[in-house]
Image: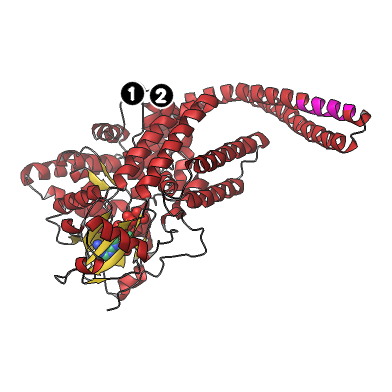
Amino acid sequence: MKWPQNKKLVNQSLPRLSPGGSSYSPFLRQLKIFGITLKLIFSLWWDKNLGNNSSRRRHRLAKWLVKNILELGPTFIKIGQALSTRADLIPIEYIEEFSQLQDRVPPFGSDLAIAAIEQELGKPISILFAQFNPTPIAAASLGQVHKARLHTGEDVVVKVQRPGLAKLFNLDFEILHRLVRWLNRFIKSIRKFNLEAIYREFFELLYLEIDYIHEGKNADRFRDNFQSYQRVNVPKVYWQYTTSKILTLEYLPGIKIDDRLALEANKIDTQEVIQLGITCYLKQLLEDGFFQSDPHPGNMAVSQRGDIIFYDFGTMAEVKTIAKDQMVKTFFAVLKNDTDEVVETLIYMGLIEPVADMTPVKRMIAFMLEEFRDKPVDVRAFEQITDEVYSIFEQQPFRLPPQMTFIVKSLTTLDGIARALDPQYNLLAAAQPFLKQIAFSQQQGGMLGVFAKQTKDFIQYKFKQPNRTQLSIMRLESRLDLGELQVKVKAVESERSLKQIQLGIKSLIYTCLSGFSLLSGSVLLVGQLKGVAIALFCFAIFWFILLLRSLTSMAMTEKMYKMAQK
Ligand SMILES: Nc1ncnc2c1ncn2[C@@H]1O[C@H](COP(=O)(O)OP(=O)(O)OP(=O)(O)O)[C@@H](O)[C@H]1O
């Protein structure tokens, strides 16, 4: 029997993945990882000093990093994938390049896959399965998926972990920990990023992901949560064929969720798919507090009947659930741009921690409400609030939990999927069925009361909407309230002094370097070492050009500041 193949599976022109842990020399691997890190730090430092901070340059550096990540193999591919969700922390060019790590992974040989299955399940493949397709239907950084048939006749998929993965993880994380300690010790300016905490976060996350028993348990829990949803399918786990390295699931084929043409060709209503998708996600997030933190299009499919199928439960995140009346209130708070109410809910859910001065957090939430309420959710918009997020990070003990960024990333992904199906779609309109469902669920009387009151408040709010001038004045007022204007004035003043100090130091260094090169060149010229002397003169000219550049920058900054003061 011939089974269907996944066409977009392999791009053979890509660098090959590292084979596994056993063939590595720990010393050489450490040398390579340290080398790449130092080269990256040096390139960033160099670009910063030369003011070479263009988007093209950042793309080039990010591409170079992706190439190295692919060569380093699964641990780093996973870290790159996780970083591709951190639009709040790294520049958009890196996000874009890292996002490509999702699909670009070649498979490993079927002989290795079969050997791993036989070793893990303790029996020859022919005893285990009536049929086993040696060509995988999908390959990812941690494992690959093969189709098979049990002797009982049921079709299944067998997810096989890359051989030697656990060993490689142990080695890589040991090296990374050493690297983090080394960077903290020798590069003072890096300490503020709290690399140790970030290291621990990734460590725990990735170790859970390579445990397929954990993934199977997540699938069972997810299926339980959606028990009453007839139109949501979650594959059954075959526990007798599952270990920490092998996961056997019921075979549930489907059409890729963002493939509009294929859905339409199968007469599936895309509007229904969008609403069902949004409903499923809101339920996971608000009702169950247990959600798929990486809902990329490969993790969801649509069956011939138009039901949604979920795959991949390796990266689930948890948040505290909220009561249904609070859900309705929060939904209307979003509609009304009520920052305080939204912030209160997020604090309750443990998504942000309360601190004495909540101004930057409120500013960030206000920005998000303003930015994403009626428009497409665009990761690029996060660039504008990066400074805000950094300032929040610096306020101890505030932290932005990873769940928050997972939610943002999930929303952007879902929004992208929905937009691929219907460019006119609106997130809030698509959320209506979920809201209605809550209003008409259990304790109907009470919920309908809350719903009716919120609707009444919202209609009153709409009638009271100010005109354009009033709106501008109110915006100015609220920005003053949120401390935005004050922060900016302070920032301009201190930024100027800081920039002047930096330029002064740079000029001093360039003067010393050009003087030293010139002097050494002259001495060597006298000593008949002409070639070296010419090289040193060239260096002297190079440093002198940089010196002139710094001095001009200093003069310009000062002039502009004086003009601004007049
Ligand atoms: N139960 C299933 N039935 C049919 N196809 C499946 C099933 N599970 C997985 N697949 C197919 O295999 C692909 C990869 O599965 P899955 O996402 O679970 O693997 P993964 O190794 O965790 O990949 P990644 O980490 O990149 O998401 C899916 O996109 C889907 O096409």
* Residue 516 painted magenta: yes
Query: Image check: 374 left or right of 506?
Result: left
Amino acid type, mark 1: Val
Name the residue rendered at 44%, 26% in the picture. 394
Residue at 36% over, 53% down:
142
- Residue 513 picture quarter: top right
Q: Residues within 10 Å of mark 2 (few under 14, many from 20)?
A: few
Sequence-first disc among 2 and 1: 1
Q: Position of residue 420 (x, y in %)?
A: 38, 62
- Disc ID at residue 395: 2
The percent position of residue 527, horizontal first and vertical second, equals 92, 29
Q: Are marks 2 and 1 in contact (CB under 8 Å)?
A: yes
Residue 301 visible in the current orientation? no
Going by the numbered disc 2, the residue's amino acid type is Gln
Q: Position of residue 190 (x, y in %)?
A: 51, 29
Horizontally, is 35 left or right of 545 in the view?
A: left
Judge whether 510 appears above or below 214 on screen: above
Quadrant hosting residue 433? bottom left
Part of the protein shown in magenta: 513-523
Between residue 17 and residue 503, name the one nearer to us.
Answer: 17
The residue that disc 1 covers is 355
Vertical side of 447 occupied by 361: above or below = above
Quadrant where the C terminus sits is top right
Residue nearest the observer in this picture, 8 or 442: 8
